[in-house]
């Protein structure tokens, strides 16, 4: 899947030259509506310390992260397969210009939120992280800044998801996002070793 995301990003680079798209910033979202959501609920689900740690880390490196057109909703449901081979992508309504590593981080954190009887163990998930990172880099090398930012981007994605679910009053999914956030926080060093 890392190879598939890298190929999609390559195609997006060509599209950037020919179409208009939304220019967005994960950092601005975190400091904007995500902050407002957690403040409005008095930091009940996410602590101010958890928020500050990830956002401050993201802010220190954000300007150095490559930006480009991304899918913004990368998960297995948006990949098409024919006879076991990737044949295409769908659902581009959230596509935007943002940090490039958002897509691979979103895909990997999304694996943890899949509701099934075959949920990943932490060890299995880290193996998937390593595999996806190697696949991506075989087509599109990541910068050292991107590799360093992966854990905090994953944490910000889970906070963004939690804030979204708080806003739509889906407390179960908001709590699930918080649980994934804490799992990522607990294995930051292990995640970094996979890149």
Image: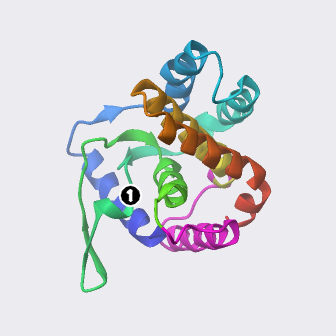
Rendered location of residue 89, percent (x, y): 26, 62
Give SS at disc 1. helix
Image side of residue 22 versus residue 180, left or right: left
- The chief SS type of the magenta part is helix
| Quadrant of the rendered image containing residue 68 | top left
Looking at the image, is 129 positioned above or below residue 40?
below
Q: Is residue 176 visible?
A: yes
Looking at the image, is 178 positioned above or below residue 39?
below
How many numbered discs sit on the rendered protein?
Answer: 1
Numbered range of the magenta stretch = 117-146
Rendered location of residue 67, percent (x, y): 47, 43
Q: Which image quarter holds the N terminus? A: bottom left
Picture colour scheme: rainbow
Q: Is residue 43 magenta?
A: no
| Quadrant of the rendered image containing residue 164 | top left
- Which residue is identified by label 1? 9
Picture residue at 63% right of the left edge, 46% below the top: 179
Image side of residue 117 versus residue 184, left or right: left
Picture residue at 25% right of the left edge, 50% below the top: 15
């Amino acid at each position: 899947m890392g190879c598939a995301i890298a190929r999609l990003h390559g195609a997006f680079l060509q599209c950037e030259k020919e179409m208009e798209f939304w220019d967005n910033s994960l950092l601005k979202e975190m400091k904007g509506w995500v902050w407002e959501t957690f403040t409005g609920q008095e930091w009940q689900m996410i602590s101010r310390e958890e928020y500050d740690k990830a956002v401050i880390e993201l802010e220190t490196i954000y300007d150095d992260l490559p930006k480009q057109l991304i899918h913004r909703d990368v998960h297995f449901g948006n990949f098409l397969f024919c006879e076991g081979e990737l044949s295409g992508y769908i659902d581009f309504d959230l596509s935007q210009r943002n940090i490039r590593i958002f897509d691979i981080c979103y895909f990997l954190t999304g694996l943890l939120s899949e509701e099934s009887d075959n949920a990943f163990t932490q060890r299995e998930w880290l193996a998937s992280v390593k595999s996806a990172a190697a696949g991506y880099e075989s087509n599109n090398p990541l910068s050292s800044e991107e590799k360093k930012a992966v854990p905090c981007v994953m944490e910000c994605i889970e906070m963004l998801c939690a804030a979204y679910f708080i806003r739509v009053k889906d407390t179960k999914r908001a709590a699930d996002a918080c649980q994934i956030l804490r799992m990522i926080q607990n294995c930051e060093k292990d995640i970094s070793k996979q890149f």
